[in-house]
């Protein structure tokens, strides 16, 4: 007989009673993934306050303490918990800062993909006809190239035209742009398919009879009803974008070593793996794998929950 | 100005009779066909070693003329696929006609752009068949009902909008406190009331109702029907009411138009139509109503199926199933002819007095 039972369900109560939370409570994999993912995001965001040293600050780097092993191996220095890389930077700090860069590029690229893809998908699905044919053929053409190939070509062109230094200075926005432009068709196709299903429903006709403009019908009426597939592909796309960034960095077309992401850390350490300093490449690699795996597992769970056929049937 | 006025008069069909003077909405020579053949590349076929363009159409509406009088409820009846809903959707501008004109209060509206149509949107509204699909699942009832008001009355302040929404919810029998809820929290009948409230919110004078009660439970149908009739009396509404339930027509309609395969075969006052159906199809339709009395004439059994609207029959669309069809019916398309009691029938047999 508390107050909440008589009043309308609040947002929090609706969430508490939802199927989303119900299935989350019963899925141990999803719980672990969420904890790991939130933990990684938290330490990456808080890197400037958490990490023992600033890897971007050349004054803090001592070349004499380079290639020190992590703490469980003989010859380690207690100051450097996970050892140091070839330039004497603390691995723990570099990884925290690198994860920050990787996540920033991942989220930024997905935001750009979603923006382009959702707009194109809505336009193609709602307006149909020639606009639809044009946008979808554009998507087909782009999908027939591998994402990485498009990214490599654009990256190499930018690097060749503006020079390596400009590229390094604007590496984060450039990578967001490159990866964002390379993957928008995924969103456009998914959104278009949902729009085609939604636009024949009577509430869209009702909105048209009311006299609403196409823009408002698309964004206010149709878009909110296509959000679940957008959420689901967003998780997968974040993981993909982080991997694409790592791959580009590994190929030397991504983040510069002075401002490393997880990918460029792996690349930097790769040269020393034969000389015994395996931790420089393997520890960032493990962090990358854990990050991507946790996002993918979360995405899997979300896809199962949001697929109405699996629970409404 | 002068040239514009002349163009306006040119648009009018000369066959206007005195009854269109009081008519609110006129439909003239309406035709609609839908392409079945896909885009240009899909249309190319090989025939006898040559590449030819092959196009096929569904002829949904084949020349419909209707007048809807101010203050009446014009019921359109006919079996599934006869084009009733297509007429309704063309009248509301949801799809554009292939040929023909729609005029509202004497002004042509089927060729207007969306901005020019906005003034008419306020005066004509629509109620849909399926109340489970006609409310946006992501919007609360309050948002759903406020949206048309904010669009058509941008100068109203928030208090005025809220007051109007409350009034309109009251008038359809929905508690205004339920405004924060979503559509899926209501039953079918309640949702249809909300959909009616949305249509009434902008104070329209003309409402197109496309089978508004056929998706509802039988026990709810009468309530919603009475609500519509109440609204008609209180607000002096005009209805174009699409249905296939003849009992509803008898209860609700001022006049009835019977449609068959995209054409109107008979228009009459409700009482006249039920007492004395003229067109052979209307007669068959009326005899199919189950009745308790035993002394009525035998049920008219029609042979065969409704022909496909892709390849229309020549002449009268009903000739293949009509027991009175002769050679003229197979060749000449019958036009609506006014009878002495005001009924209009499109049938050669009626015209010739064979029936």
Image: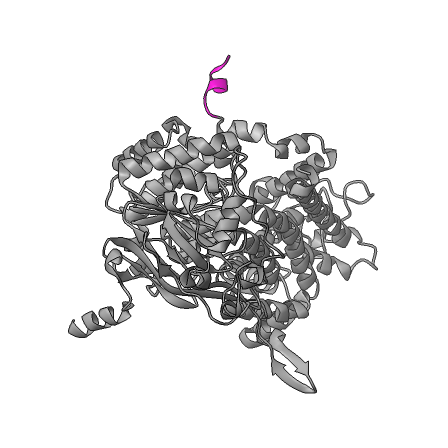
Snapshot colouring? one colour
Q: Residue furthest bottom?
A: B49
Towards the viewer: B189 or A291: B189
Residue A224 at x, y = what percent?
50, 46
Q: How many marks?
A: 0
Asked if the stretch drawn in magenta spans residue A2, the answer is yes
> Is any atom of residue B311 visible in this view?
yes
Towards the viewer: B52 or B240: B240
Towards the viewer: B209 or B80: B80
Q: Which region shows up in magenta?
A: A1-8
Q: Is residue B131 shown left or right of residue B174? A: right
Residue A262, image quadrant: bottom right
> Is any atom of residue B161 visible in this view?
no
Asked if the stretch drawn in magenta spans residue B248, the answer is no
Residue A246, image quadrant: bottom right
Residue at 23% across, 59% down: B18
Residue A121 at x, y = what percent?
54, 59
Residue A57 at x, y = what percent?
57, 53
Quadrant holding the C terminus of chain A? top right
Q: Residue furthest left?
A: B2
Residue A122 in the image: above or below residue B183: below
Residue A197 in the image: above or below residue A50: below
Residue at 81% across, 58% down: A273
Q: Is residue B48 shown left or right of residue B325? A: right
Residue B35, image quadrant: bottom right
Q: Residue furthest top?
A: A1
Residue A100 at x, y = what percent?
60, 49
Residue B132 in the image: above or below residue B180: below
Towards the viewer: B164 or A286: B164
């Amino acid at each position: 007989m508390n107050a909440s039972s008589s009043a309308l369900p609040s947002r929090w109560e609706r969430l508490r009673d939802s199927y989303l939370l119900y299935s989350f409570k019963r899925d141990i994999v999803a719980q672990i993934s969420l904890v790991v993912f939130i933990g990684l995001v938290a330490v990456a965001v808080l890197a400037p306050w958490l990490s023992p040293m600033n890897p971007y600050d050349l004054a803090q780097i001592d070349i004499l303490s380079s290639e020190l092993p992590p703490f469980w191996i003989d010859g380690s220095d207690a100051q450097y918990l996970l050892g140091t890389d070839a330039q004497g930077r603390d691995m723990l700090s570099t990884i925290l800062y690198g994860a920050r860069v990787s996540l920033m590029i991942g989220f930024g690229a997905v935001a750009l993909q979603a923006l382009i893809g959702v707009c194109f998908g809505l336009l193609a699905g709602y307006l149909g006809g020639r606009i639809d044919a044009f946008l979808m053929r554009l998507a087909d053409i782009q999908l027939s190239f591998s994402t990485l190939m498009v990214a490599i070509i654009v990256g190499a062109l930018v690097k060749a035209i503006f020079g390596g230094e400009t590229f390094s200075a604007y590496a984060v926005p450039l990578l967001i742009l490159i990866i964002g432009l390379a993957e928008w068709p995924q969103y456009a196709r998914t959104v278009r398919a949902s729009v085609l299903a939604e636009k024949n429903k009577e509430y869209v006709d009702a909105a048209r009879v009311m006299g609403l403009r196409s823009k408002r019908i698309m964004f206010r009426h149709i878009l909110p009803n296509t959000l679940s597939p957008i959420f689901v592909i967003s998780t997968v796309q974040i993981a993909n974008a982080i991997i694409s960034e790592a791959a580009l960095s590994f190929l030397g077309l991504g983040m510069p070593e002075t401002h490393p992401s997880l990918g460029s850390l792996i690349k930097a350490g790769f040269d020393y793996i034969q000389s015994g300093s395996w931790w420089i490449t393997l520890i960032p690699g493990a962090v990358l794998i854990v990050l991507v795996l946790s996002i993918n597992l979360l995405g899997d769970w979300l896809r199962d929950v949001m697929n109405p056929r699996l629970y409404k049937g | 100005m002068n040239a514009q006025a002349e163009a306006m008069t040119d648009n009018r069909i000369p066959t206007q009779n005195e009854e269109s003077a009081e008519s609110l909405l006129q439909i003239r020579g309406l035709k609609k066909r839908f392409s079945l053949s896909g885009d240009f590349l899909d249309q190319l076929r090989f025939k006898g070693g040559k590449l030819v363009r092959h196009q096929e159409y569904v002829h949904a509406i084949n020349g419909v003329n209707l007048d809807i009088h101010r203050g009446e409820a014009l019921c359109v009846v006919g079996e599934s696929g006869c084009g009733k809903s297509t007429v309704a959707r063309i009248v509301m501008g949801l799809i554009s006609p292939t040929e023909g004109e729609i005029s509202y209060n004497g002004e042509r509206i089927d060729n207007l752009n969306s901005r020019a149509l906005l003034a008419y949107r306020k005066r004509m509204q629509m109620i849909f068949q399926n109340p489970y699909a006609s409310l946006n699942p992501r919007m609360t009832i309050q948002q759903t009902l406020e949206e048309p008001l904010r669009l058509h009355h941008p100068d109203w302040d928030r208090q005025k909008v809220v007051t109007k929404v409350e009034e309109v919810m009251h008038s359809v029998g929905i508690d205004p406190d339920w405004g924060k809820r979503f559509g899926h929290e209501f039953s079918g009948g309640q949702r249809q009331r909300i959909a009616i409230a949305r249509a009434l919110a902008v104070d329209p004078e003309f409402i197109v109702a496309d089978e508004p009660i056929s998706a509802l439970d039988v026990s709810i149908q009468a309530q919603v029907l009475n609500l519509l009739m109440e609204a008609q009396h209180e607000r002096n509404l005009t209805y174009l009411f699409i249905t296939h339930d003849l009992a509803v027509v008898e209860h609700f309609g001022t006049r009835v138009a019977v449609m068959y395969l995209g054409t109107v075969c008979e228009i009459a006052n409700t009482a006249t139509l039920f007492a004395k159906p003229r067109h052979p199809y209307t007669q068959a339709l009326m005899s199919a109503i189950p009745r308790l009395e035993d002394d009525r004439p035998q049920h008219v059994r029609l042979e065969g199926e409704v022909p496909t609207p892709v390849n229309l029959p020549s002449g009268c669309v009903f000739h293949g199933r009509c027991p009175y069809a002769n050679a003229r019916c197979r060749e000449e398309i019958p036009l609506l002819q006014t009878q002495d009691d005001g009924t209009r029938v499109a049938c050669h047999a009626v015209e010739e007095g064979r029936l």
